[in-house]
Image (tube, rainbow, N blue to C red):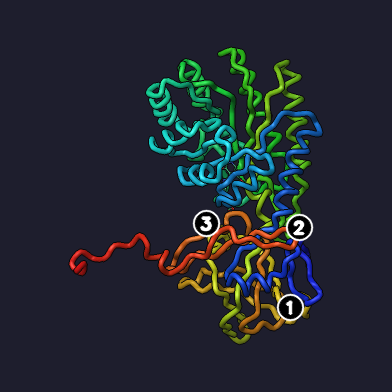
Amino acid sequence: MFFHGTSRVNDKGHLEIGGVDTVDLAKEYGTPLYIYDVALIRARARAFKEAFQKHGVKAQVAYASKAFSSIAMVQLAEEEGLSLDVVSGGELYTALQAGFPPERIHFHGNNKSREELMMALESGIGCVVVDNFYELELLEQLSKQRGKTTAILIRVTPGVEAHTHDYILTGQEDSKFGFDLNNGQADEALRKALSSSFFSVLGIHCHIGSQIFETTGFVLAAQKIFQKIADWKETYGFVPAVVNLGGGFGIRYTSEDDPIPVSEYVEKIIEEVKKQVSEQNIPMPEIWIEPGRSLVGDAGTTIYSIGSQKVVPNVRHYVAVDGGMSDNIRPALYEAKYEAVLANRVLDEKNEIVSIAGKCCESGDMLIWDLPLPKANPGDYLAVFCTGAYGYSMANNYNRIPRPAVVFVENGEAQLVVKRETYEDLVRLDLPLKTKVK
Ligand code: LLP
């Protein structure tokens, strides 16, 4: 059995996280419940930052808040001195509500609206990562209207393929994101941006994919980017102050995954950037990265209550929980794999192989196939590990299932940071049929 962060088994045989018994949490806050190990998030944030400090490299580690955005989470990122990557007006709004320093916010997205861009400019965010020509024009217009210069990064697609699931590849040529590095579009974008007096071009950005276990992809991406930087220096006399290599650092979901420590990714990146910089004899840029999953993924655990079971003789034993694709769509969407234990009987002998079904009306709503588990009974609690990234943030109300609550635990204390949705919340935006109004 593999435990992440502060997770351990207490003397009752229960799963404990952050010094708090998860069975007590399930009883107090109900299930499904997301529990975050705050100490683990802090440790990851520090590991990223220290890896840069150790090498004396100026850097920004921006938490990709799409992995899990909430006011408390953003405040935790702030406490740890991270910057913040937001990709929508909603994530930006959350950050601003959390009191996050706007100058440390970076705004991403392949189709930012006029309203979103305006909101970003008016709140004084640090930079906009420009994704396409439409946005470049729109942003110039808006900056002109405000009579102010906007700091931008130019997002490019370096054509580097990361070894991961197809759906989460973003660095290849055939991508909806960014300016292509090889077909002249990135050059055209830079030329346009430099010719406008309303932009201050900080540098270049790329993101090659997600859940990546090797450093090769990052090194290749850095090489491609620096080839381009050499061209740009020659053609436009442009040398970037910032090189942002995105996120995508892999985590351990199951025993099949074997990630390297975050410091290794950072070290390889630094090594390559230093090499390129010295070859080209240009000043060392700031290196920015944008980890999402690797900051919060394995810090999150979901606790479910076990309900019905169905045994199909000689075929399969289904054990159903009180959530599913509504709180974790990753198995259905990416065939993502997870490990789990009975939170209230962690040490009991695992004498059955079961498959964990969700409660949604869809056959594909399965959370885990073929999981060794003790014989489970209604009322037992199932703890699914590593649900901290893209779990709550991709949760939905399919079948009008209310979204779960989120609790932070640290040093023996628990704090509710997102309330459970209620049935009233579910109909809050609904309006009655006109003819029935009276
Ligand atoms: N920066 C950019 C520009 C990105 O597009 C992403 C993720 C990140 C940073 C953070 O990547 P991370 O470090 O979390 O891998 N829903 C999928 C993941 C989609 C990732 C999209 N972009 C999943 O559940 O696996």
The answer to whether marks 1 and 2 mark residues whose Cβ atoms lie closer than 8 Å is: no
Earlier along the polypeptide chain: callout 1 or callout 2? 2
Compare residues 190 and 22 and report the one nearer the observer: 22
Q: Is residue 272 left or right of residue 187?
A: right
Q: Is residue 139 above or below residue 191?
A: below
In the rendered image, which residue does mark 2 sit on?
5
Give the amino acid at mark 3: Met
Label annotation for residue 345: 1
Q: Is residue 292 above or below residue 382?
A: above
- Gap in angstroms between the C-alphas marked 3 and 1: 29 Å
Q: Which mark is residue 67?
A: none
Circle 3 SS class: helix
Does residue 162 appear in this view? no
Kindly identify the amino acid type of the residue bearing the numbered disc 2. Gly
**Quadrant where the N terminus is found in the figure:** bottom right
Q: Quadrant of residue 264?
A: top right
Residue carrying label 3: 394
CB of mark 2 within 8 Å of CB of mark 3?
no
From the Cβ of disc 3, is ligand 1 less than 8 Å away? Answer: yes
Camera-side mark, 3 or 1: 1
Alpha carbon separation for disc pair 2 and 3: 23 Å
* Residue 355, horizontal then vertical, whole percent: 62, 75
